[in-house]
Image (cartoon, rainbow, N blue to C red):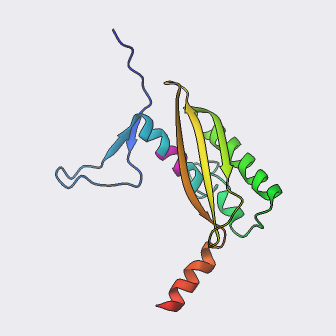
Amino acid sequence: MEKKMFLGTGFKFPPSVDPGTGRFLTSSGEQSVKESVYLILMTQRGERWVIPEFGSDLMSYTFMDPSVTMLNVMSNSLRSILLEQEPRISDVQIDIDPQTREGCLVVSIQYRITESNTRDNLVFPFYLNAGRMEEEADETQ
């Protein structure tokens, strides 16, 4: 009999409702892990008052100078936060492309899902001056 791996099932992120049933959509397995990694990164520590230690300090890097030193500090911080808060992953590697494109850094995260020994990744843009970009968009409208 094949051993069934259990990575968990939870609400899909972002929360969505199935129009046919009216129920919240769920995600499970590797998709649940990927959504959890994204949620950890995009939640500012202290934002959840019930679990204030949950989340990352990613937004504290918003107006940083993208020097090699600061990119290494950011990468090491995010790596330790993910290993601390997502027990289903290991062997986390974070690469940040030092070339900014329109105020955006490309952050590439590779990790191993511990239970299945499967490699997965998440790539997302990180805007260094997100507040200023929103103001410029408001001015043009």
So how many labels did they put on this image? 0
Q: Position of residue 123 (x, y in %)?
A: 55, 51
| Main secondary structure found in the magenta portion | helix
Residue 48 is at least partly visible in this image: no
Q: Is residue 58 above or below residue 28?
A: below
Q: Position of residue 95 (x, y in %)?
A: 67, 48
Task: Residue 124: say if magenta.
Answer: no
Q: Is residue 22 left or right of residue 56?
A: left
Q: Is residue 32 left or right of residue 56?
A: left
Quadrant of the rendering where the N terminus is positioned: top left
Q: Quadrant of residue 16?
A: bottom left
Furthest residue toward left: 20
Q: Position of residue 32 (x, y in %)?
A: 43, 40
Q: Nearer the viewer, residue 140 or 35?
A: 140
Q: Nearer the viewer, residue 50 or 100?
A: 100
Residue 80 is at least partly visible in this image: yes
Q: Quadrant of residue 89?
A: top right
Q: Is residue 12 above or below residue 61?
A: above
Who's the residue at 64% across and 37% down the image?
A: 92
Who's the residue at 63% across and 80% down the image?
A: 132
Task: Residue 36: say if magenta.
Answer: yes
Who's the residue at 68% across and 43% down the image?
A: 79
Furthest residue toward top: 1
Numbered range of the magenta stretch:
35-39
